[in-house]
Amino acid sequence: MSPNVPGHRILEVIREVPGRRIVLRTELDGVQCSTRVILDARLDARHAPLVAELVLRGRGSLAGMPEAVGLVLEGYRVAARLPRDSRWWTHALAAGVTPDHHAYVSTRWMEGTPLHEVSGPLHDDVRVPVLMGVAFILHELHSRQLVYGDLKAENLILSADGLPALIDLDTVREVPAENLPAVTRDLTRSWAAPEQHQHHSYLASDIWAFAGLVESLSPGGAPPGWRELLRACRHPDPLRRPQTRMVYEVISGERTGELLDWEGRPTPASAGTERTERVGETPPGAEAPAVVRTERVADVGSPSVTSVVAEQVREEGPSRPQLPSCAGVVVGLFLVPLMLCVGGGLWLDQRYVDEANTAAEAALSGLRAYKTRPELNRDTRQRKALRDNAQAAWEIRTTARAGAVYALALVWEQGWQDSGRTWNDAAYLEAKAHLDRISGSNEPEALLAAATLAGASCRLRRTEATAVGDCSRSLDTLDRFFELLPDREDTRWLGVEGAWTEVLVLTDEAYAAGDARLPEAATILKRGLDRCELTEGWLSWAPVNGPEMLQDCLVLAGLAPDFKRYFAWSRLLLATDQVGGQPNADTLRHLYSAAGTGCDSVKVTRGKRGDYFYKGADWCLAVGHAARGARAEAMVLIERAADPSRPWTQLQAGLDAEESL
């Protein structure tokens, strides 16, 4: 039974993979479409606008989406930035959620013949323009730092004018740079480059697949002028493959000289001339499944024009790369083959180390964006996506950098550095287990993660015996963190995160020491105030959590009491935490609620004309008025001081010093 797709008239079922997806030919407002319905998971109806935003405009967050749905939608989200008037690829016309709660994507129907259904060898007058067209498509994508990721004959339509067009964009991904990979999970095994089997797609991964396309369209052998190109395209190191522009120029006949790789070097003269063995080929003599016309067909047993269709492989998770086996090499001549094998293994291992560290840095950049860009930070669903990216880096190779970034992502996913966060035992145990695996790490991110986790346990589980010592462990680890944190502008956002964790722990400790009338309360307060002052110059690098740290610094200054710092930090908070050029009620409330014990009940409300009204104890109101610059209102309360337990004289002195500035 065909699904009900809003606004579409179903013309035919093109292909169905039970439980995963169904591809339909539909009509939408008089336009024929290929409509893919994702059956892997159900979505709530309220997700429909988000799916449309993702697919049609490339906006919104995939965080919180089921993985199977998110993998498909991510490609269309990236592809939404491609020119919509191009004839080289289809584009999405509609997207949303069906009444049966499945996401769907509709793309314009491309008239023509799927390239894999073309019978017989192509003559040069057809083959060359087709391959030139594919090379041009790749050049257009790569110039935008987009990797297609699943180039194969089944994803190309040959139109009546003999030019190709892409019909499936759900594997499109953006790479951070032309020589860096995107972490991916989908692949078609028989066309994928070696690095894609380790879930990394470079722009150059498309070049490997392009070589397979050339071979599939040249059953009698590629023209002599292309053979060096194909050898270079099949180099196991993606960065040693030729640049896309070079590929296009060779196919079009514009280039006959040397080829340059992705780092500007001449490509190796020999990169392995034999066609590689393909994974998952249909065994000789085996009966193949029937082929149907499809918008996105599955994996081909062998990339040839007449090949049949098998289901595309979607691997559930990255596998840990292993060193190549040398057992078959140590035969006959022992030493040289063994050295070659070990050397190749070490090269490959170093390659994975480099890829893991590169992916870890990309994941850390994502964490930094989330922590420093307010528009991203508002969407807490981003936390899971950031954690997944860091985990993918760790699973490539368990390097120190990947382990540290993954630890930080695990902890920050819970938001435990936020003073109002609730406890989660399962998440704590998961993060703790990972930190135990990388114990002894001196990476600043690992130290910050350990300090944040211990600090959260200290604050949120204070009454539990298992949390005894977590406060001191957090503070000791933070000492080490600040000692090892490089003093650079690009690390100051991390410094603010560490300082905020320290201030939160010290505030909690100060309250406990004060309640117990312990003499070390003053020492605790001094450490916290000094940390706030040391970090003050870094706040511009932390527009998200900087103001929140300032709010907690005010609490320490109010407990001290230290009115010089209280008033200085109030001015800074008012200047940095504004909406529409005016402080909001929540910001103002902190100026009053941080004035000392018993002030957290102060009410700040805004009237219809924009005026603020304050309600609370005289002491709290006096400090708050003084902090926001309302000296006259503060003096009225100071002159009628009625609570002898409050340091009114110090407040008066602080107010006088403030006026003299």
Image (cartoon, rainbow, N blue to C red):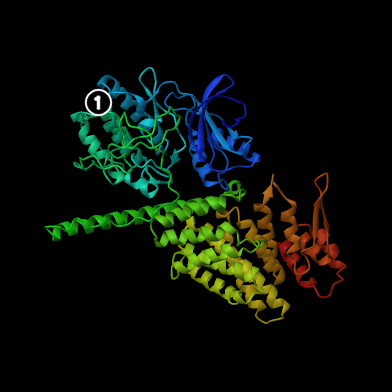
Mark 1 Cα-neighbour bin, 10 Å: few <14, some 14–19, many ≥20 = few
Which residue lies at the image location 42% right of the left edge and 36% below the top edge? 144
Quarter occupied by residue 182: top left
- Residue 66: percent from left, percent from top: 55, 46
Q: Position of residue 503 (x, y in %)?
A: 62, 67
**Res 573 quadrant in image:** bottom right
In this picture, is 390 found above or below 109?
below
Q: Which residue is mark 1?
A: 253
**Residue 419 placement (x, y as % from top left):** 65, 63
Tally of marks: 1
Relative to residue 314, is residue 634 drawn left or right? Answer: right
Residue at horizontal 58 percent and vertical 73 percent from the top: 470
User: What residue type is disc 1 on?
Assistant: Gly
| Residue 211 appears anywhere in the view | yes
The residue sitting at 40% across, 60% down in the picture is: 398
Left of 435 or right of it: where is 50? Answer: right
- Does residue 527 sit above or below 310 in this rendering? below
Under circle 1, the secondary element is loop
**Vertical placement of 287 versus 497: above or below?**
above
184 and 256: which is toward the camera:
184
- Give the camera-side residue of 127 and 265: 127
Q: Quadrant of the C terminus?
A: bottom right
Residue farthest along the left direction in this orientation: 333
Could one spot residue 528 in this view of the protein? no
99 is higher (above) or lower (below) than 608: above
Q: Position of residue 61 (x, y in %)?
A: 57, 44
Q: Is residue 640 left or right of residue 488?
A: right
